[in-house]
Image (cartoon, helix red, strand yellow):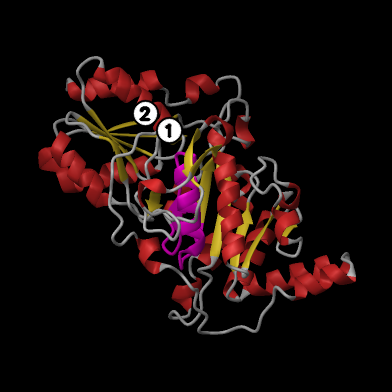
């Protein structure tokens, strides 16, 4: 298997430049291979059994979760931003499972967005370590590590640079279990990557590549919208028995602040959330775009247009049932994302809803997305699917 052999090769190369203590730490990562390796997962919480759905306001989240620490309304909470919530989730994952490892470019220093701050000091550099600037090598090593019954949490510094690892993710990680008839797997793999616009990122630090991975059976794609969501969804992704690509909206790393439960909790994957109820039109989005869409909903309400806003949270496998139920009620659908409109995941949602709700639709499905151009620098404000663009599309659908 190419990914395991490449992982071993990476370890050997690193070992040539390591001290004896570091070599001992690296050798401890490789365990005897078990063809029946199973991950200790809280399957019930990962799948969302018995987890009630509840409407959530973007600015003041109330979590109803099946957790170890979060029980009822008396759960202690702390105000924090998104990168701090990610850091706390990683801390919990490392603390609760000694098989967990975090690695990537500059992660032992805290990472460029500070998501891994203090983790190396707390858990040691044998569990939190830097890698060469080689995304293919990072993911190849992660696949091999996960196949050895570990939880490999790999960081790609920017989602724009995930493409060199595309072959490893698509042809190795996604097919690992299938090709062996479920005799072995790399389900302990989680790949974190900051994605999306940031205001000044230009071509190579602003892309939203989620739709590329949504076309690949065998992996899950998860994108949070806020700190509380990020913590719960990341812990669920790390503990899920399947490889997960976890995109983090870097625009919100510091801007998004809310009360986050301090304990260990998970939010269900593949379960969308209705965060604003309405009757005239359904809006579907994910990640940072939810903030913009919420603003458009508020503006539309001033003109007596009632919008239902849904956060998809998991793009693959996505929660069709929740969206179908909403569109059957409202008769209209608008999907919005930062990625270019052609081939974006909004097209899949549009096609699926048209197939299932055709006789209930009062207007064509609308998409408000990025343009089919490379992500611009000075023209970013014109490229982005803004509040006013979404509001205009809402009015056009309602008045159709």
Q: Residue at x 42, y 52 (%)?
A: 214
Residue 395 lies in what quarter of the image?
Answer: top left
Q: Residue at x 63, y 50 (%)?
A: 156
Report the residue marked by disc 2: 293
Question: Would you place residue 298 above or below residue 124 in this image?
Answer: above
Q: Is residue 21 left or right of residue 364?
A: right
How far across and down, in percent of the image, does residue 316 sit?
A: 39, 54
Q: Is residue 1 magenta?
A: no
Q: Nearer the viewer, residue 244 or 1?
A: 244
Tell me, yes or no, whether the two marked residues, 1 and 2, touch with CB atoms within 8 Å. yes
Residue 390 seen: no
Report the residue marked by disc 1: 289
Question: Would you place residue 109 above or below residue 338 in this image?
Answer: below
Q: Residue at x 38, y 44 (%)?
A: 345
How far across and down, in percent of the image, does residue 34 sit?
A: 57, 84
Q: Residue furthest front?
A: 74
Q: Nearer the viewer, residue 297 or 82?
A: 82
Q: Say which quadrant the C terminus sits in.
A: top left
Q: Is residue 231 magenta?
A: yes
Q: Residues within 10 Å of mark 1 (few under 14, many from 20)?
A: many
Q: Say which quadrant the N terminus sits in.
A: bottom right
Q: Residue at x 56, y 47 (%)?
A: 86
Residue 351 lies in what quarter of the image?
Answer: top left
- For label 2, the SS is helix
How far across and down, in percent of the image, does residue 185 sit?
A: 51, 74
């Amino acid at each position: 298997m190419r990914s395991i052999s490449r992982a071993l090769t990476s370890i050997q190369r690193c070992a040539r430049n390591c001290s004896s203590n570091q070599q001992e730490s690296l050798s401890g990562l490789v365990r005897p291979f078990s063809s029946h390796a199973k991950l200790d997962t809280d399957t019930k919480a990962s799948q969302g059994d018995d987890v009630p759905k509840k409407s959530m306001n973007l600015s003041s989240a109330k979590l109803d979760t099946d957790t170890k620490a979060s029980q009822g309304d008396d759960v202690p909470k702390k105000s924090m931003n998104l990168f701090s919530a990610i850091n706390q989730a990683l801390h919990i994952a490392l603390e609760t499972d000694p098989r967990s490892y975090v690695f990537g470019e500059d992660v032992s220093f805290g990472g460029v967005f500070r998501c891994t701050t203090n983790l190396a000091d707390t858990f040691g550099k044998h569990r939190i370590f830097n890698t060469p600037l080689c995304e293919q090598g990072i993911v190849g090593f992660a696949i091999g590590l996960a196949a050895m019954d570990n939880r490999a949490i790999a960081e790609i510094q920017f989602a724009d640079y995930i493409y060199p690892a595309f072959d490893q993710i698509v042809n190795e990680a996604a097919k690992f279990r299938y090709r062996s008839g479920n005799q072995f797997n790399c389900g302990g793999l989680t790949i974190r990557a900051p994605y999306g616009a940031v205001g000044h990122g230009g071509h190579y630090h602003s892309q939203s590549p989620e739709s590329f991975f949504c076309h690949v059976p065998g992996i899950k794609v998860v994108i949070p919208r806020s700190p509380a969501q990020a913590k719960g969804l990341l812990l669920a992704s790390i503990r899920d028995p399947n490889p997960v690509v976890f995109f983090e909206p870097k625009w919100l790393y510091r801007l998004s602040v809310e009360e986050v439960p301090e304990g260990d909790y998970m939010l269900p994957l593949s379960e969308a959330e209705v965060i604003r109820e309405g009757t005239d039109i359904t809006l579907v989005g994910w990640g940072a775009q939810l903030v913009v869409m919420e603003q458009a909903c508020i503006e539309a309400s001033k003109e007596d247009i009632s919008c239902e806003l849904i956060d998809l949270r998991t793009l693959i496998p996505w929660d069709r049932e929740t969206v179908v139920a909403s569109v059957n009620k409202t008769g209209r659908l608008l999907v919005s994302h930062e990625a270019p409109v052609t081939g974006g995941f909004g097209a899949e949602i549009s096609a699926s809803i048209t197939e299932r709700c055709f006789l209930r639709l009062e207007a064509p499905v609308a998409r408000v997305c990025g343009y089919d151009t490379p992500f611009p620098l000075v023209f970013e404000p014109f490229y982005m699917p803004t509040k006013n663009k979404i509001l205009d599309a809402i009015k056009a659908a309602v008045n159709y």
